[in-house]
Image (tube, helix red, strand yellow):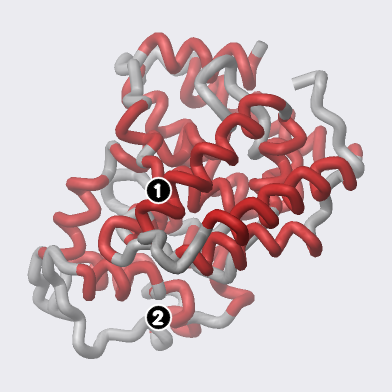
Amino acid sequence: MARMNFTNPDDKTVLNNWITNVEKNIIQNSAITSGQTKLKKLATELDIFFLQYPLIKKSIVHENISSWGPICIFQYITDEENIDYFWDLSSTPAPVSGCKIYDILLELTKDNPKVQKRIYLKDIACSVSFAMVTRIANMIYDVPENQRTYLLSLRLPNGISLNQFIRISLAYYPTTKPIKCERIIQMTSKFIDMDIKTSIKSSMKALLDSFKQNFTPDKTSEDCVAIASAQILPFLDLSGGFMIGYVRTTWEPPFGSFLEIIHFLNEIAKLSPIKNQRHLRIIHEYFFM
């Protein structure tokens, strides 16, 4: 962690305090014997920490964890472990709202009427369907902006955050509605406004020009994704600066950064399953050594 540079020295203190707490309560907790369980708990704590401290997230989310990839990919890999849970809550009928996930939210927000009364309960599909994926993905817009961190930080019965739950719904978009060629171009053009080095902007400008030239009218969405992936991924391997650029190049909510789009399109999580103790050791060495 010493190699990280923070503009605000207080951020380093906050991060170190979080690391100390997680080291004690999860990593070195003898009551938690399963490496898989420790990874899941760590992923949730990291997710909530990033919600509460977005500037710290911006500073470290692109950092690589050994050869496993950046921290944000660790989050997505652990999300894959919760897919069955996502569909269980999203498709099981319940007595109050009509759907299990919403009954849980009503219970969790009972002490916060400002949030609870804003949760939209009409026409819930409550099924394994794209309609339910869309509903969950847009759930955050039910509540005022100043209450969203609170809502996303809520812990569901299996221990994950609501933010992790919602993120699973976002991963389904590329599989149900293929990304259009023009959207890749629009996303790439966002680099102009990003807080990244001029040299990185120049490289992204070259990518943009290449996409415009190669995304001809005869190209399908799949063609454009293949072209973009082939040209983008080598840059991500070449330099951490490119990784920062793609983390900070953002699309409109709820889709997040360009890197997240690349991740979803290439289904990185399916290619990098959690390996229990080995991956726990890698995470431990990154954060706690």
Task: Label 1, secondary structure: give it.
Answer: helix
- For the question of whether residue 13 can be seen, the reply is yes
- For the question of whether residue 165 can be seen, the reply is no
Front residue of 90 and 226: 226
Q: Is residue 199 above or below residue 22?
A: below
- Label 1 neighbour load within 10 Å: few <14, some 14-19, many 20+: many
Q: Earlier in the sequence, mark 1 or mark 2?
A: 2
In the rendering, which numbered label is found on residue 116? 2
In the rendering, which numbered label is found on residue 265? 1
Task: Label 2, secondary structure: give it.
Answer: helix
Front residue of 113 and 205: 205
Residue drawn at 45 percent across, 68 percent down: 217
Residue 78 x %, y %: 38, 35
Residue drawn at 27 percent across, 67 percent down: 133
Front residue of 144 and 215: 215
Q: Is residue 78 above or below residue 55?
A: above
Residue 269 x %, y %: 36, 35
In the image, 45: left or right of 187?
Answer: left
In the rendering, which numbered label is found on residue 282? none
Name the amino acid, label 2.
Answer: Gln
Q: Quadrant of residue 236?
A: top right
The quadrant in which the N terminus is found is top right
Q: Quadrant of residue 285?
A: top right
Residue drawn at 32 percent across, 25 percent down: 273
Front residue of 71 and 219: 219
The quadrant in which the C terminus is found is top right
Q: Give the CA separation, mark 1 to mark 2.
A: 34 Å
